[in-house]
Image: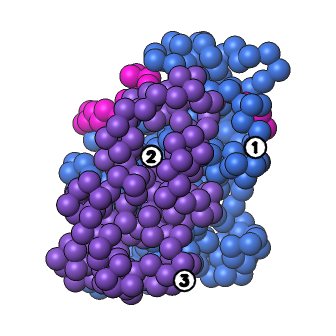
Amino acid sequence: MKLVLTVNGRPVSLEVHGATRLLDLLREQLFLTGTKEGCGEGECGACTVLLDGRPVMSCLVPALQAEGGRVTTIEGVAESRAGSALQEGMARHGGAQCGICTPGMIVAALAYAEDPASAESMGEALAGNLCRCTGYTKIFEAVAEVLGRRP
Amino acid sequence: VRSRLEEFGIAAPTSLEEALALLGEPPPGRSATPLAGATDLYVLLNAGQLEPTTFVSLLGVPELAPAMRWAGDRLSFGALTTYTETRRDPHVRERLPLLAAASRELGALQIQNRGTWAGNVANASPAADGVPVLLAYDAVLDLASRRGVRQVPLDAYFTGYRKSVRAPDEIIVCLSVRAPGAGARHFFRKVGTRRLQAISKVVAAGVLEFDPSGAVARARLSFGSVAPVTVRARRVEALITGQRLAPGLVEAACRAVHDDVSPIDDLRSTRAYRAALVERLTRAFLVPEPA
C-alpha cells in the first residue's frame, strides 16, 4: 500500500506492506535507526516513539494504522526544547550506558514532560522502559532535573 | 519479525458494514482476524506464532469509536475504548474505579495508549487483567456479524482456554458495565513479579455492596490466571450474599474459594503459590486493611 504520514515534522510517502511494523518502517525504509528493537513484544520500551503525541511501542504498530499519523522518533526530539534538554540531561548525568534503552527512555520522558497528567509519577511514566544495564538511578536523576521535580 | 509478512494481509474498513463483510468472507484459504490496538496480536506476529491471516484493522470504523454513554447505572463504551481513555475519564474514576485501576496496572503507558478493553476480552487469555474487572462490574458484550447483533453477558462468554462463544465473523462492538451503588467496596489486586505492568501470577477484582443493616447485598469476586478462563468465585459470592462479614464467615469464604479456582504450575508461578494467593486475596477483599 501507499502510506502517507508525518515523521519528525516532515511529510513522508512510501510503498509498504500494511502489516509492516512501524519500527521496521522507520529503521529500514526511512533509515531512522535511533529507534531500537529490544524485546519485540512490547515489554521493554526500547522502540518507543510518539504517535499523534502519545508514546507507543513501535514494534506493536502496524504501518497501516499509522496512516495519516504524526510520528516523532528520537531523531526528532531535539526540535522541542524539552526534548533537547532531556538529551543533554542524560549526557550530563551519565544516563546512558549501553544506550539501547536511551532513545525510548527519552521519548517516553518527553511524552511525560508534555503531558504530565498521563502518569501519576515520573517512575510510572517510565515504567514501560527497561534499562538492561539497570542504570535507572542516573536516568531518573537526569529526567527529574529536566522536569524540575524529584526522581 | 519472525513471521513472513507476505503471508499476511491487512485491510482497513471504514464502516462496520465493510468490516463485517471482510470478516464474513475472508480471502479464499485464509482466515480474517479483527485487529484493534495490536498489543496482543503483534506480539504473536513478531514471535512467529500466528497462522497466516488477514487482519481487519478496526481503528477506522466509526461505529466502534470510544464514545462513553451512561444510562442509569450502566455505562457502555465502544470497542475501541483504550485503557488511557478509561483511566482519564472522571466519571469512570469515580463510579467504576476498578476500570481506572486496572488500566493503570496492566501495561505500560505505551500499551495503555493502544490496548483496548474489547481486545482484552477477544484475546481470551486466562491471564487478562481487564477481564476480572469487567466481570466484577457485570459486563455485557454486543457482538455483531452480518447476521445481526446479539448481547452476551461476559460471564457466559468464555468456553475454555482461549475459547469463547464469539464466532470467527463476529466482532465486539461495545461493552457495558454496571456501576455499583454508593458505599460499595471496590477491590483490584494484581500480583506479578513487579508491582505494576508485569504479567500476573494472580489477578483479582471484586465488588461488595451492602444493605442498610450492613449485610452483603451483592457480591462479585473474580480471578485471572488461576483457571483455563477468568473465573467468578461463585461459591464465595453465594456464601456471603445476605450475610454480615463476621470473622467465621470470612474464614469459610477463604476455604470455599479453593473450589472456585483450579490453579496450575506454569512458567510464571506455581499451583501452591497461586492457591495461597487466592486465599489471601479473598481475605483482603472481605476484610480491608485499615487505611
Q: Residue furthest right?
A: B29
Q: Is residue A43 visible?
A: no
Above/below status of B133 relative to A12: below
Quick check: is B61 in the magenta stretch?
yes
Above/below status of B25 relative to B105: above
Quick check: is A59 in the magenta stretch?
no
Placement of the C terminus of chain B among the 4 image quadrants: bottom left
Above/below status of B245 relative to B92: below
Q: Is residue A135 visible?
A: yes
How far apart are the alpha carbons under marks 3 and 1? 30 Å
Q: What range of the chain is rendered magenta? A: B51-72
> Mark 1 highlights which residue?
B3
> Of the residues shown, which amino acid type is indicated by label 2?
Arg
How far apart are the alpha carbons under marks 1 and 2? 22 Å
The answer to whether marks 3 and 1 sit on the same chain is no
> Of the residues shown, which amino acid type is indicated by label 1?
Ser
> Mark 2 highlights which residue?
B114
> Mark 3 highlights which residue?
A133
